């Protein structure tokens, strides 16, 4: 039988023993688990970035993967800790919007409040539920415990509103959602939105105007900002061989406008 | 049979191939091992921080885990390389104080000098014993080799003195031991020390006076420094939604005083 | 049967979900794989550093390891994606010089162009072939697919020229190839080159003159630059208890000269 797979996504960083403690707890309960990291470098307490990164990786997770995800400004408060089953995957973490985006649209979803103390550590630190509640719950799910055994069903999940671009006849107005390691600026403008103006659109961001949407980094002019649809099917501003964030001095939240070129067909 | 578990804690960082080389060596000897990282971001050659991080994670390690731990300013010198068995765990690393804190108080401990070259790489780099001596020794232990086979027994382990707080009738004087990823200031004042002044104590650190010890980050005033007992059962100075280290401009070694509030019962 | 081992080396960093997505894809195809990281902190698009780090770790990889290696300024362009089998290992990545150094001198090598779409994801992002082409190809190799099945054989691999030191009767002139986490300056001068001047050589770098080549960090004078042969058998400039890069304000590309001491025998 295949070994259970547990993936972790947190804002804990790798500087401290925190992620190590979570893995230790998982392996104590489910020694056969294969554990891997999605990322632990979500900016501290930035639930929106956590939710977007989780959404981005979900299509690639093997069926049956249990994801432990902790970005939790409200740790120790009355916000719920939940386990969610949807689309053949399970998610465990705080109910603060981190998980909902990844399971949005799944009609088969089951949500429970992780209240059954049989499946947490005996003592739960008010400051580290990742170690004491979420890691154990995930490990028990990976071992085959049914999600219903973790606690009572919950009707709704906390929901984050990702800013949607404004689409008019001639323009799409969006924002930069995320800056990646390479300085690429990933926007909230998706492949579907772009369809309305076509690849012939002009892209305006900061002081720069980009003449066309390319298909790969290597097609961009060297050292100048370019636009393309990136690996998560969103419009990205990138620099071939450099950093768009650095060159344009622009970060998350910056405005991006895609404009239909005069005379171009839709 | 369960797969053996090997955990790594070093100051090697993740910038170079060094940790990868250690894992390669482990898997070459013990291909069934499950390897996980505690952290590799101990500040270079900071044995004290390594020892404290190791101590913090030990209570959560699955029985039988073999920990390879390398923070080793004296690599290549005459300091011993040791394997230690205690409390159902094994530790492998330099005998410079890094391990002793984690096994202090264990009367069942077995310590050996890793001198048997049958369980190291044939050639041992004078600058990278982590790869050539410690990783192989740990992998052989995980494969089932007896600790006594690694080399001759050793009587004592090098010991680090973690600074202890000064406790008087009215005050506890401690220091910041560690600053974590979130900018939380973790002190050497433990839950047991705090019992002597009660949660009603005032906490003084730098320019700040904190009125009470809270139980969770979410209970702290937003944007102002607060105090609470953190996940390793030590007094922490933290800022709800921010960084205490940043706000107070304070780091490791800073003084912290807990004072009994006038008129408060113990 | 032993579980297949897959090692990753990229410039993707750990800030984003990119490495997590690659591991998810690997485990979806080969759920029994043991995956480990060599490093993901190759400077963005720095193929030379990637090739050198790969070369450094190769001697330690267990037989049968499949290495996925992606540092790929030309992602999405016409550069080939290749799988290479040599010396009992497999390598998968872009054919841009990243792999060739690690397999140089192996006469048994087999190289194929990963063109068979049965062993890639159905849709290949023009900006993330690591996820859609290289991770799947590696996972299929780990599952036992023959390298020949991945695509047609290729005659040659793109080759990087690592700068070679200039050796004369009295001097060796080299450069710093890499600065590691500890601030050690790793040069292109190997143990074999040093043989020509002996350990009695003077080492000159920046403003510093170092009197002899030591054998271990602990032998170096505290706080002053020293020279020794490091764990990859190259001449390193290091500071005992400090950073040579910081102290000398010197980085990659800096010149290093080893000079025979007057009157010393070869």
Image (spheres, coloured by chain):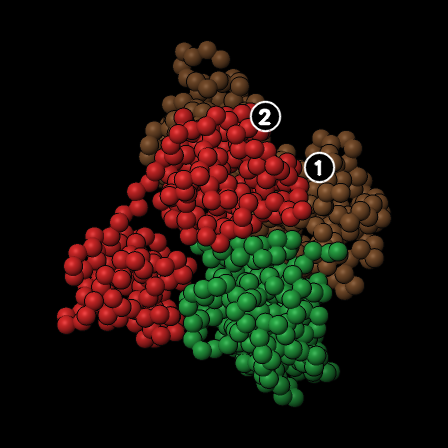
Chain colours: A green, B red, C brown
Q: How much space separates mark 2 and mark 1, taking CA atoms?
A: 20 Å
Q: Residue at x 70, y 34 (%)?
A: C104
Quadrant in which the C terminus of chain B appears: bottom left
- Position of B9 relative to A193 (above/below): above
Label 1 packing within 10 angstroms: few (<14), some (14-19), many (20+): some
- Position of A94 relative to C151 (above/below): below
Residues A119 and B239: in front is A119
Residues A161 and C84: in front is A161
SS at circle 2: helix
Q: Residue at x 33, y 40 (%)?
A: B160
Whether marks 2 and 1 lie on the same chain: no
Residue highlighted by disc 2: B118
**Chain letter of the residue beneath label 2 in the structure image:** B
Residue highlighted by disc 1: C63
Whether residue C18 is visible to the viewer of this picture, yes or no, is: no
Spot occupied by residue B49 in the image (x, y as percentages of width and height): 38, 47
């Amino acid at each position: 039988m295949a070994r259970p797979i547990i993936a972790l996504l947190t804002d804990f960083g790798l500087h401290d023993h925190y992620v190590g403690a979570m893995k230790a707890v998982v392996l104590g309960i489910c020694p056969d688990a294969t554990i891997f990291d999605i990322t632990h470098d979500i900016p501290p307490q930035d639930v929106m970035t956590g939710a977007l990164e989780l959404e981005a990786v979900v299509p690639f997770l093997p069926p049956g993967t249990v994801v432990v995800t902790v970005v939790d400004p409200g740790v120790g408060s009355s916000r719920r800790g939940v386990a969610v089953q949807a689309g053949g995957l399970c998610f465990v973490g705080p109910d603060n919007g981190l998980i909902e985006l990844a399971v949005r649209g799944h009609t088969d979803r089951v949500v429970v409040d992780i209240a059954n103390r049989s499946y947490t550590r005996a003592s739960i630190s008010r400051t580290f539920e990742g170690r004491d509640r979420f890691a154990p719950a995930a490990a028990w799910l990976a071992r085959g415990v049914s999600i219903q055994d973790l606690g009572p069903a919950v009707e709704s999940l906390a929901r984050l509103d990702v800013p949607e671009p404004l689409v008019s006849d001639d323009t799409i107005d969006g924002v930069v959602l995320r800056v990646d390691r390479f300085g690429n600026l990933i926007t909230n403008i998706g492949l579907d939105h772009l369809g309305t103006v076509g690849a012939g659109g002009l892209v305006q961001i900061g002081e720069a105007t980009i003449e066309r949407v390319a298909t790969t980094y290597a097609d961009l002019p060297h050292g100048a900002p370019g636009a393309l649809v990136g690996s998560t099917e969103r419009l990205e501003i990138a620099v071939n061989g450099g950093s768009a964030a650095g060159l344009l001095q622009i970060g998350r939240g910056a405005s991006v406008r895609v404009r239909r070129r005069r005379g171009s067909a839709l």
